[in-house]
Structures are given as structure tokens and as C-alpha cells.
Image (tube, rainbow, N blue to C red):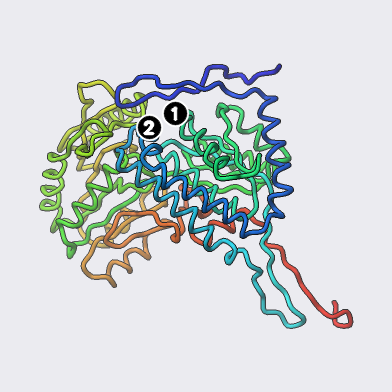
Amino acid sequence: MKTLSMTSPVKTVNPFNNEILREFDILTDEQIDQKIELADLAFQSWRKTPKAKRAQLLHAVAKILRSRKVELGKLATLEMGKLLKESIAEVLLCADIFDYYADNGERFLADHPLDTKMGSAFLSYEPIGVLLSIQPWNFPFYQITRSAAPNLMAGNTMLLKHASNVPQCAQIMEDIFEEAGAPAGVYQNLFIPGSSIDKLVADKRIKAVTLTGSEPAGASIASAAGKNVKKSTLELGGSDALIVLNDANIEQAAEAAVRGRIWNAGQVCVSPKRVIVEAGIADAFLEVVKAKFQALVVGDPLDEKTDLAPLSSEKAVQDVIRQVEKAVFGGARLVYGGHRIDRPGAFMEPTILTDIQPDNVVYQQEVFGPVFMLYKVKNEQEAITLANATEFGLGGSVFSTNEARAVNVARQIDTGMVYINHVTGIAPELPFGGTKHSGYGREQSPAGIYEFVNAKLIRVTQPQNAY
């Protein structure tokens, strides 16, 4: 039997203590082919399944997620380290997303009439086939849900290639779909190495691919999909700006910025990675932020008193520490933290950097950890210019007590999402996605269900009027 080039098992390593919890064997080429075939076969019947019955499956998944929220939350925490309360909130968000598409999917997919001069015309939204979903570890359940819920409701089937450090979360979602009554092949998990993905994208039975991950991974997938004339969507992270205008409530803006930055130990694509503050309030703002950082409790993510969890892996913490060291070497001022914590696990101190100049290495980088980078600007226009001085364009925030002013600034920020007086967030009914090097396509909201359907035009005229 032919096997893949990588034969080492997929491992779960608890980042709280770096202990190996469980291992899974990777699939052989023959096993992968069988799963693709099963997904393709399942599509032939799932596409014909009434939408109301598809909705029943999604509701059943949501019900299971809510009933097992603590168990699933603990699993995510053990695999990638986030606070248990964050993990449980993630599971509940996933349940809401499944319910959202179950409740609204049939309406979203209803025929859309078009105005035409002769006869009648409408768009029929039809599924396209087997989708390959490639997802990261930072939100091990949510990342799956964003692509699975709308696309299964639309009548597609799905193969998941999850991050290698969250295999238990990957497998348990397949188990949950089976428990909910999903027909065999509608949703399957694949334990495969990244090196095998191009081959899957090229497989004629797989019709499209969606990826959340790094910019290099996205470029590779987009290239492979384009080569094979297949649709793709990409969400590739960001370097989101949080702008604090001089009329903002300093306490509220600082609290939001700090909580947004340490959320998931700073490992969030839409985390406020660059905090841009007008000069008149910058010093006062920094003092409030520093006091909040000093009060943070770093520790066991299962302990409800903990504010800051470990990073996802030993490599992750080493990478972020190295970025901080390079930033300081390049002239940035280290205001607080910046070091590895002397204890078992992938822990680092919450960190504040200021005085980051355009020639500093971190100026154009995404720092995926609890590093708060503060930029002082002269005025509103300089804040906008700095916010746009990045190749990324995912999310962003503007804080001001003047709504009209904040909205005007938001319109000038080149991103896919901007929140006013709130860090970039998540809700089932709101579209999620970016522009520039943050990728393309949208998930969630009505927009999320249209990415991988065929919007087929059907035109009707009387025989004597046909042309």
C-alpha cells in the first residue's frame, strides 16, 4: 500500500505543560481516495435533500454543541491553550452559527427574481460539489463552523484538513456530525500533512477550496486552485489597527484594546495589533494600558481567574519572543514585559512596545501573541495613513464619542471590516473577510452561503417571443 511521504503521527501537545496527550495516524493515499469518493457519492444525494432536512441536521449539530460545551471547551483548551471560558464561548458561537444558517438558509437560497424586459428570469442557487476546507488551530471549532454551516446547508459536502496540533477537535467534529445524523460522506475529517494538499486541490472530484491561514499558505492554495480552474476563498490574517481619536473615552478604549489584544493570548487574526492614538491623549492612554497589563494574571487556562493563557505551542512562543527582540534591537521601546516566563509551558509576559518606526522589522509584520504595539500620531489624517500602511486589510476599530467622525474615519480604512467603539468581533449575521493580502471572499451572514454555489440564470419566455 502506498503511503504519504510523512509517516509520523499527528500529535496533541498541551501547551500548558508541553506534554503529549494523544497521537493519530495519518491517512494513506488509498484511504484519502476512499474518503473523497465517499464525499462525492454523498453529494449526489445530499444536493437533492430538501433544504428543510438539511436545516434539521444543522440544528441537531447546534444542540449537541450546546449540550457538550464544557467537554468541547476543555478539549480546545488542552490542545491549543486558550482560556476555558474563551473555549466555551467559541463552542456556543458555533452553535449560534449552525442555527443561523438552519433558520435562514432556505430563504437565502430561494430563487432570486430578476427584472427583464421580456418574459421572466431568476437566479437558482445550486450546490457545486465536494469542498476542501483547510483551517488553522487558533479557533479549532469556529474555523470549521464558518465554512461547514453555510456550505452544508447549501447542499455541498465537505472534507476538512485541520491544523496538525488540534487533531482531537478535528475528529470530534466529525463524530458530532455522525451523532447528529449526517449521511455518510457529507462531512469528513482528514489527517493528512500539508504537503498532500495540492494533490487534493487537483482532484477533479473536489470542486472548490477554502482556507484560513498564513499568507504563504494562501498564495499556494490560490495558485493550485487557479491552476485547476477552481473557486477559492482565503482569510490570511491581518495587522489590524485600532484608532483612538482625541475625543474618545480613554478608559473604555484602553479596556477594549487590552482585552482585544490578550484575547486568545493574542493569537487572533482580527486582534488589534497596532493601536494608534492621537498625541494629545497618547501618554494618558499608555498609562492606563500599562496598569491593566500589570494586573493581568498569567497561568492555567482551566483556572477561571487566569487572564492570559499560554501560546499554542513551543514554536509559537519562541517566534513571538524573537519578534519582540528584533523590534527592540531595531529601536522600539520596551515599556512592559517582553520575555519568556520561567515556568513549564508556552508562556510569555504580556508585552507593550512603543516608538516603532517604519524601518523596524515588526512595522510590517503580524505579531501573533500578547504584544501590544502603540503608535502615537499627530492627528486624525496621520492615524488613517498609518492604519493603511500595511499589506493586510482584514479588520479594524475606531474609538470616538463622535459617531459621525468615527464613521468617516472608518470609511477611509482599507479593510474588510471596521467596528466603532468595539474591537473587531464575530456574529453569525455579520460578514467576515478582508481585502488586500488578507485574502478574499466572505464567511458568515447571507454572503457566506453564496461563495460556493452556482448562481444559475434561468430565463423564461413564450415561444413566439424567444430570441
Q: Which mark is residue 80?
A: 2
Q: Residue sitting at 53 percent across and 48 percent down?
A: 147
Of the pair 299 and 269, the residue shown nearer to us: 299
Q: Secondary structure at mark 1?
A: loop
In this rendering, is residue 326 above or below 409?
Answer: above
Q: Is residue 406 above or below residue 215?
A: below
Q: Are marks 1 and 2 in contact (CB under 8 Å)?
A: yes
Residue 57 is left or right of residue 238, and the answer is right
Residue 454 location, quadrant: bottom right
> Callout 2, which amino acid?
Met
Q: Tell me residue 370's x, y (percent).
A: 27, 38
Residue at 45 percent of width and 61 percent of height: 429
Callout 2: 10 Å neighbours few (<14), some, many (20+)? many
- Residue at mark 1: 165
Query: Alpha carbon of mark 1 to alpha carbon of mark 2: how far?
Result: 7 Å
Query: Residue placed at 69% from the left, 18% from the top?
Result: 2
